[in-house]
Image: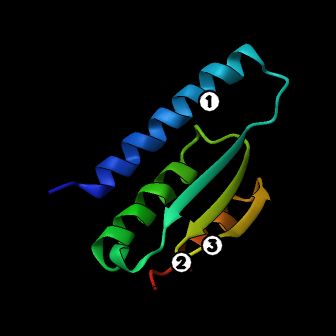
Amino acid sequence: MINYKRFFAILLIIVISLSTNISNAHSNFTKNYVFLLDLSGSMNGTKLIEAKNAITEIVNSTAIQGKISIVGFNTAAIMYFEPSYDKNGAIEAINSLYAGG
């Protein structure tokens, strides 16, 4: 069985690591982090809880130094949090997400 929390955490760490390496080469660019989360019915329960916890941990980390966006998808993609430096607002948006459909 896949450990989704570990999967999402590893995936997001890779993205942050790549972003950091690119940003070091181009330090004049603003960093934008887009977190994409599956909100379909198959994510209901533990899967969604672990995914939200993993994203929250990463948003809270000091590695995130740029604008954060939260996008969820089910039958369509919806932006739940517009690009912003507000980590607390991003976490509130993450906590408000639920699986459905």
Residue drawn at 56 percent across, 69 percent down: 73
Q: Which residue is mark 3?
A: 93
* Quadrant housing residue 16: top right
- Name the side, left or right, on which 92 lies relative to 74: right
Q: Residue at x 34, y 75 (%)?
A: 42
* Residue bearing the label numbered 1: 19
Amino acid found under the numbered disc labelled 2? Leu
Amino acid found under the numbered disc labelled 3: Ala
Q: Looking at the image, which is closer to me, 58 or 4? A: 4
- Counting every numbered tag in the picture gives 3
Q: Tell me the residue that label 2 is attached to.
A: 97
Q: Amino acid at mark 1?
A: Ser
Q: Position of residue 71 (x, y in %)?
A: 63, 63
Specify whether 18 is left or right of 10.
right
| Residue at horizontal 47 percent and vertical 43 percent from the top | 12
The residue positioned 78% from the left and 56% from the top of the image is 84
Q: Residue 2: percent from the left, percent from the top? A: 20, 54
Residue 71, placed above or below residue 22: below
Badge 2 or badge 1: first in the primary sequence: 1
